[in-house]
Image (spheres, rainbow, N blue to C red):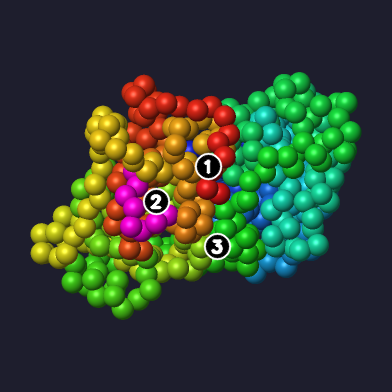
């Protein structure tokens, strides 16, 4: 029997490949399914099942494509939701054979009502691993406020109560020796305090995970699990619906997005459609020159999360500017979070645009020493676009907080006639923020290279470590 965790860092997501005696199962696959198919073919195994722990919110699963390409059955736990594709709706305790191994469905409502864990039992009848989806993370549990975005009468308190019961009655009685394999790790918005570790024994989680304290009452659990939750990204409910209703094949999405457009064709498409021009190059490359009105979300940062946060509609048409050779990667990573309407990319990238004599734009970006020199000549307006929690922890005294994740509200607080020096933690989000406002007519925004880390390290700016009343939002 083989178990392989396939972890994708940009989504902090774990998919799983299980194989026994020529048969395989995939748990919570990503949108691009060919790697799973290749893995099974290389090992002369047939993919028999695609197990889904729940209707995911933070990414579009590859279950529909994988079933279509392999003939595998899609399996969900008990649900009242009608899917737009053929699926096996399993019962609590139902067992599925994968070669000589057995996978038992354990219904664990709470994160969502259909949420289920899958218990792997080996050829000798020994319980080996528990694939917990978003029910139990390493160091945390799934947030119980997401399903209410899809089903209105499911309040977060009701879901938290269900989650408490699921953990106490279904998970905690299991053997301490079980290996827990969750669907997410640190960085995912599906929890609030996840560990960087991507697996652990159930016994250790019983000792260290706050949500599994043996002496915790249901009321205490509900209070603790709901405290500190921030609003989820706006694309979450849209991804849930795609996972329930189905979606275009990833092959169709790639074919649509991989249209190579000349600078002239790209300009026409930008002018004649409502497409967002998305430049995915690195921030410091972008600021030196870009297509006017393009927004920058670098592919090498938390790309999918920020696309989902800042582009409200997953159906939005998108025109791509990317580093040469990375166009397919960009289209695929957009599709992972449901943005299937990339309609082409700029052939030859920004360099081809500039070489063709098209109009270009740039953003001034200065280092900390230059900012300090300008401050010595008079007051400067510093804007910190990190999250409110980061700002509250510590910030440059006098800096105003305008979080990128609430960019429309933040923008309304700024004066177009003033000059602002914009920073984040390290320089990724500040360029995203500045590019968005630049596209909307703000001409007096200057990026601070290196962000708060560089500002603090320079010791030239006084830093406060208490909540400041000048927070804008």
Q: Nearer the viewer, residue 333 or 355?
A: 355
Residue 109 percent across, percent down from the top left: 79, 48
Report the magenta residues as a range. Answer: 414-421
Q: Return the disc, 1 or 2, that comes first in the chain's sequence.
A: 2
Labels 3 & 1 near each other (Cβ < 8 A): no
Labels 2 & 3 near each other (Cβ < 8 A): no
Q: CA distance from mark 1 to mark 2?
A: 20 Å
Q: Which quadrant of the figure has residue 140?
A: top right
Say above or below: 275 vs 135.
below
Residue 302 percent across, percent down from the top left: 45, 44
Residue 240 visible in rendering: yes
Dot 2: few (<14), some (14–19), or many (≥20) neighbours within 10 Å? many
Say above or below: 201 vs 150.
above
Q: CA distance from mark 2 to mark 3?
A: 40 Å
Q: Nearer the viewer, residue 313 or 451?
A: 451
* Residue position marked by numbered label 2 in the rendering: 433
Where disc 2 sits, the SS reads helix
Residue 361 percent across, percent down from the top left: 21, 57
Dot 1: few (<14), some (14–19), or many (≥20) neighbours within 10 Å? few
Dot 3: few (<14), some (14–19), or many (≥20) neighbours within 10 Å? few
Where disc 1 sits, the SS reads loop
* Residue position marked by numbered label 3 in the rendering: 68
* Residue position marked by numbered label 1 in the rendering: 470
Q: Where does the N terminus fall, quadrant-wise? A: top right
**Is 225 a magenta residue?**
no
Identify the residue at image location x=60%, y=39%: 184
Identify the residue at image location x=68%, y=48%: 53
Question: Is 344 displayed left or right of 85 in the figure?
Answer: left
Where disc 3 sits, the SS reads helix
Q: Which quadrant of the figure has residue 247?
A: bottom right
Residue 271 percent across, percent down from the top left: 29, 75
């Amino acid at each position: 029997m083989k178990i392989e965790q396939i972890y994708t860092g940009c989504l902090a997501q774990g998919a799983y490949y299980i194989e026994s005696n020529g048969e395989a199962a995939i748990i919570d696959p990503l949108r691009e399914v060919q790697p799973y198919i290749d893995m099974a073919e290389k090992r002369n195994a047939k993919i028999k099942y695609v197990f889904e722990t729940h209707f995911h919110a933070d990414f579009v699963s590859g279950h529909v494509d994988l079933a279509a390409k392999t003939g595998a059955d899609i399996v969900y736990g008990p649900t009242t939701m009608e899917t737009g594709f053929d699926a096996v709706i399993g019962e609590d305790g139902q067992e599925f054979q994968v070669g000589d191994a057995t996978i038992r469905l354990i219904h664990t409502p709470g994160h969502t009502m259909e949420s289920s864990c899958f218990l792997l039992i080996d050829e000798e009848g020994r319980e080996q691993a528990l694939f917990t989806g978003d029910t139990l993370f390493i160091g945390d549990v799934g947030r119980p406020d997401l399903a209410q975005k899809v089903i209105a009468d499911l309040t977060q308190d009701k879901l938290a109560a269900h989650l408490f019961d699921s953990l106490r009655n279904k998970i905690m009685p299991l053997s301490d020796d079980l290996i827990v394999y969750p669907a997410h790790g640190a960085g995912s918005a599906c929890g609030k305090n996840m560990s960087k570790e991507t697996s652990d024994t159930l016994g250790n989680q019983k000792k260290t995970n706050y949500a599994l304290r043996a002496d915790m009452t249901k009321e205490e659990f509900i209070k603790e699990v709901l405290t500190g939750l921030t609003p989820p990204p706006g694309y979450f409910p849209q991804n849930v619906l795609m996972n329930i209703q189905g979606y275009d094949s990833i092959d169709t999405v790639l074919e649509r997005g991989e249209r190579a457009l000349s600078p002239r064709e790209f300009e026409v498409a930008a002018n004649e459609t409502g497409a967002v021009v998305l430049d995915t190059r690195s921030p410091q490359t972008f600021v030196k020159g870009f297509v006017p009105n393009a927004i920058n979300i670098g592919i090498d940062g938390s790309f999918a999360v920020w696309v989902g946060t800042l582009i409200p509609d997953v159906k939005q048409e998108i025109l791509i500017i990317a580093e040469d050779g990375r166009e397919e990667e960009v289209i695929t990573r957009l599709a992972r979070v449901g943005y299937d309407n990339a309609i082409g990319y700029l052939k030859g990238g920004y360099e081809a645009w500039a070489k063709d004599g098209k109009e270009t734009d740039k953003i001034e970006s200065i280092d900390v020493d230059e900012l300090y020199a300008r401050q010595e000549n008079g007051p400067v307006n510093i804007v910190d676009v990190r999250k409110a929690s980061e700002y509250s922890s510590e910030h440059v005294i006098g800096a105003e907080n305008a979080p990128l994740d609430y960019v429309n509200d933040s923008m309304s607080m700024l004066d177009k006639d003033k000059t602002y020096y914009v920073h984040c933690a390290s320089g990724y989000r500040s360029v995203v923020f500045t590019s968005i406002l630049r596209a909307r007519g703000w001409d007096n925004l200057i990026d601070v290279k290196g962000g708060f880390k560089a500002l603090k390290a320079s010791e030239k700016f006084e830093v406060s470590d208490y909540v400041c009343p000048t927070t804008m939002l």
